[in-house]
Image (spheres, grey):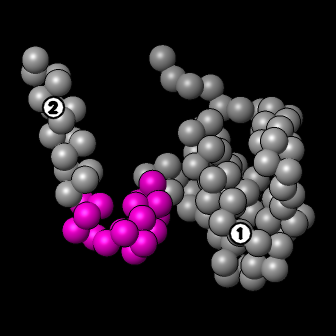
């Protein structure tokens, strides 16, 4: 069973609700970047990850600072990269390793 793609109207409604809940707006060109990225990968998880990335943007962000990935994998890799820069590569890799190992141990029990 696959997850159905969201319609354009659904995407607009979801984005409007998320932005209103945070009392935020996106510049028109930023909203276009988000919607264009979503067209490349029309899955709900990708929309959420991409929206969370836009939360780092400011109204004065340049176009080079307002770009998004086009797949879930690339978006997650970018997120991990940013976390590694902020908290250190060793810490992040080991923490993710422990989470993965813990998941395996729970599965075997």
Question: Do tag 2 and tag 1 residues touch (Cβ < 8 Å)?
Answer: no
Which residue: 56% across, 25% down?
Answer: 3
Q: What segment carries the magenta color?
A: 76-93
Please give the label number shown on residue 69. Answer: none
Which element type, helix, strand or loop, lies under badge 1?
A: loop
To which residue does mark 2 refer?
A: 104
Q: Which residue is mark 1?
A: 57
Dominant secondary structure (helix, strand or loop) of the stretch shown in magenta: helix
Residue placed at 22% from the left, 68% from the top? 90
Residue 85 visible in the shown view: yes
Does 101 appear above or below 37? Answer: above
Q: Is residue 8 visible?
A: no
Q: Quadrant of residue 102?
A: top left
Mark 2 vs mark 1, CA separation in Å? 37 Å
* Residue 10, horizontal then vertical, whole percent: 80, 32
Quadrant (top left/top right/bottom left/bottom right) for the C terminus: top left
As helix, strand or loop, the secondary structure at mark 2 comes to helix
């Amino acid at each position: 069973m696959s997850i159905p793609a969201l319609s354009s109207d659904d995407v607009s409604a979801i984005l409007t609700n998320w932005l209103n809940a945070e009392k935020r707006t996106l510049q028109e060109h930023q909203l276009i970047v988000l919607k264009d990225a979503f067209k490349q990968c029309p899955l709900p998880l990708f929309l959420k990850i991409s929206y969370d990335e836009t939360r780092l943007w400011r109204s004065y962000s340049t176009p080079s600072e307002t770009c998004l990935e086009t797949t879930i994998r690339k978006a997650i890799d970018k997120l991990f990269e940013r976390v590694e820069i902020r908290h250190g590569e060793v810490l992040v890799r080991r923490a993710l390793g422990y989470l993965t190992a813990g998941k395996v141990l729970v599965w075997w029990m």
